Image: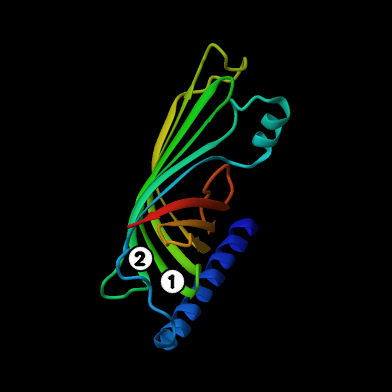
Amino acid sequence: MKSNYKTDCLVSILASFMFIAVTLNAQTGQEQVPSEPDRKNNIGFQFNPYLNERFIEGAISFDFNHVIWLGALRYGRRMDFHDKLTIGAEIYYLYSSSYYFKSKQFNIGPYFRYNLFSYKRLGLWGEFSPTLNYSEIKFDLSQTPAGHPFEDYSDVKFGYYIAPGINIKSENGRWSYDFMWKFSGKALIDGRKHTPSIKINFHF
């Protein structure tokens, strides 16, 4: 209960910070350099191992069979009615395995990103995304530890995250690198309610 309370408080603080930043930015928006109008669309992708204890153990033993792998593909567009707002959709995939099970999770949903501050090729923004999450675990009964009659499992749940992040663009503006830190009142990955995330984007 205490852990959930702390997480909910943190989410509330981050949401309040984003609201204040958006309000201040709206008041000073006329003084900032507008975004390039000819590159409103972007495609982002991600594929990497999750950097937790499993990854460290796998790197030491050169065995990455039990590492959690992440993959994501998203499309977004800056809105004509408000140049600082980007709306898009994302598909997110998690995969992990062990000696006796394989686990998959698919998350899909829209995302809403608001540009809080821009300076040359650096951007600061906040993002919110509600998601529909499908998870599945399948067991290899021949490898299951004795005395543990596990059964295959699947479930569909709703989730969400809010995330502050930074964006670094290439000199020609075609490519960019995102680094964000996701927070939620629900588990996002490996039982954790907050996690970093990185993406590479192509703008057109």
Point out the tag, 1 or 2, that comes first from the N-terminus: 2
Give 73 or 109, whichever is nearer the viewer: 73
Q: What x and y, as percent, mark residue 88?
A: 33, 58
Q: Quadrant of the C terminus?
A: bottom left
Asked if the residues shown at circle 1 and circle 2 are in contact, with their CB atoms under 8 angstroms apart, the answer is: yes
Task: Give the residue at mark 2.
Answer: 86
The residue located at (61%, 17%) in the rendering is 147
User: In the rendered view, does 136 fall on the left or right side of 182?
Assistant: left
The residue located at (40%, 37%) in the rendering is 155
35 lies above or below 180: below
Q: What x and y, as percent, mark residue 117?
A: 49, 75
Q: What x and y, as percent, mark residue 96?
A: 53, 31
User: Which amino acid type corresponds to the residue marked 2 in the rendered image?
Assistant: Thr
> Which residue is at the far left?
80
C-alpha gap between disc 1 and disc 2: 8 Å
| Dot 1: element | strand
The residue located at (35%, 70%) in the rendering is 36
Residue 115 - label? 1
User: In the rendered view, does 148 fall on the left or right side of 135?
Assistant: right
Q: In terms of image quadrants, where is residue 67? A: top right
Can residue 56 be seen in the rendering of this structure? Answer: yes
Q: What x and y, as percent, mark residue 13?
A: 56, 72
